[in-house]
Amino acid sequence: LTPMSEVAGRLSIQMGAHCLEAKNGGSGILLSGVSGVRPAKVVIIGGGVAGLNACKLAVGIGAQVSILDINPSRMSYIQDIMEGHVMTVMSNSANIEEEVLNADLVIGAVLIPGAKAPKLISEDLVRRMKKGAAIVDIAVDQGGCCETTKPTTHSHPTYIKHDVVHYCVANMPGIVPRTSTFALTNVTLNYALELADHGYREAMRRHEALRKGMNVIDGKITHPAVAEAFDLEYHPFEP
């Protein structure tokens, strides 16, 4: 669901900016800064679709941006397309700690399709963050990549723990339904027509993309990462 990751990534900076406002418990810092005043430091953990889109928006606003990932080629790609306006950092425990402790806004964008997100930010690390800093955990739908993450809603999106504002809304794209619907329809309509015209088994046989996205058929889990996450038996799909 690349379009939803795009939307969530871009929203994370927008929502993070609100979290940093003093009225919301934040430090009262403007992401872009102004003449003579430093911008906010934004740290993005995960360089996938969501992380890259968060990066683009944060850089465009004028924030100081670091992005961490475990894939050197991905970091090289991000470094190239951002033309040096972002610092790419290898994701490991030491670098995560250093970047998070200096961050005004942390974006958790570690997404593993069908599997739980790894807990990369410990509660102890959150406790040592700047007072009034903010965390936006895009990975909350997969359990979150921060130990202090708990799911919130669009009506009550934030909470404060250890003096850090947390935004952990499940289904972030739901707050911009018009954009999200058009973006999702653009990439799913052809598959929906295939399912309607040929039935799910024939459509699955014809399209590898549909097979890769399949989670459960006839009560059996057909996605290995989902089966592993719930400690259930995996059943490969047979057309």
Image (cartoon, helix red, strand yellow):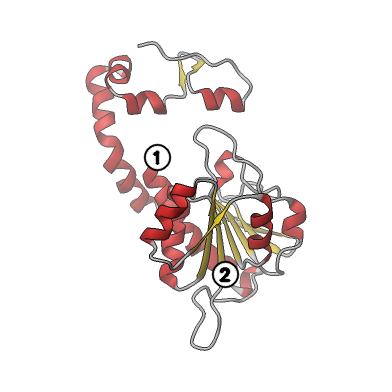
Q: Position of residue 5 (x, y in %)?
A: 43, 47
Quarter that holds the C terminus: top left
Report the residue marked by disc 1.
1
**Position above or below: 134 against 204:** below
Residue found 45% across the figure and 73% down from its top = 62
Q: Is residue 212 left or right of residue 39?
A: left
Q: Tell which of 82 and 163 is nearer to you.
A: 82
Q: Amino acid at mark 1?
A: Leu
Residue 173 visible to the viewer? no
* Residue 58 in picture, x, y percent from top left: 46, 66
Q: Spatial distance from mark 1 to mark 2, Cα to Cα?
A: 29 Å
Labels in figure, total: 2
Residue found 59% across the figure and 72% down from its top: 21
Within 10 angstroms of label 2, few (less than 14), some, or many (20 or more) residues?
A: many
Q: Residue at x 55, y 80 (%)?
A: 38
Question: Which dot marks residue 41?
Answer: 2
Q: Residue sitting at 64 percent across and 22 percent down? A: 231
Question: From the viewer's perspective, is 12 left or right of 204?
Answer: right
Residue 203: give x, y in percent of width and height.
Answer: 28, 20
Q: Nearer the viewer, mark 1 or mark 2?
A: 2
Dot placed on the residue nearer the N-terminal end, 1 or 2: 1
Report x, y in % for residue 107: 56, 57
One can see residue 118 in this view: yes
The one nearer the camera, 69 or 221, is 69
Of the residues shown, which amino acid type is indicated by label 2?
Answer: Lys
Q: Residues within 10 Å of mark 1 (few under 14, many from 20)?
A: few
Does the residue at mark 1 contact the one at mark 2 (Cβ under 8 Å)? no
Q: Is residue 83 above or below residue 6?
A: below
SS at badge 2: strand
- In which image quadrant can residue 211 be found? top left
Q: Secondary structure at mark 1?
A: loop
In which quadrant is the N terminus drawn? top left
